[in-house]
Image (spheres, grey):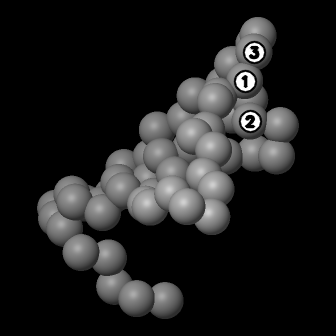
Amino acid sequence: MARPRPTTVTLFANARATRIKLLVHDGFGVWCASRRLNVGRFVWPQFDAYSTA
């Protein structure tokens, strides 16, 4: 695994899109935040073959 650069953010989500975890390396340390939705889901942008990231 590559060494994270300062201010690296990684986002993880479960399959149902009701829970996310955020892992942040800020150059001094690492912190983790999480969020769970009781109702609804997180909405992710939809990309097609013609979209650019």
Q: CA distance from mark 2 to mark 3?
A: 9 Å
Q: CA distance from mark 3 to mark 1?
A: 4 Å
How packed mark 1 is, by other alpha carbons closer than 10 Å (few <14, some 14-19, many 20 or more), is few
How packed mark 2 is, by other alpha carbons closer than 10 Å (few <14, some 14-19, many 20 or more), is some
The residue that appears at 63% across and 44% down in the rendered structure is 46
Q: Is residue 34 above or below residue 49?
A: above
Residue holding disc 1: 41
The residue that appears at 60% across and 52% down in the rendered structure is 47
Q: Are marks 3 and 1 in contact (CB under 8 Å)?
A: yes
How packed mark 3 is, by other alpha carbons closer than 10 Å (few <14, some 14-19, many 20 or more), is few
The amino acid beneath tag 2 is: Ala
In the shown orientation, is residue 6 left or right of residue 15? left
What element does badge 1 sit on? Answer: loop
The amino acid beneath tag 1 is: Arg
* Residue farthest toward the right in the current orientation of the protein: 16
Residue holding disc 2: 17
Residue 44 in the image: x percent, y percent? Answer: 61, 38
**Residue 40: mark in rendering:** 3
**Residue 21: mark in rendering:** none
- Most foreground residue, 50 or 9: 50
Quarter holding residue 34: top right
Q: Are marks 1 and 2 in contact (CB under 8 Å)?
A: yes
Total labels: the figure holds: 3
Residue 11 in the image: x percent, y percent? Answer: 51, 51
What element does badge 3 sit on? Answer: loop
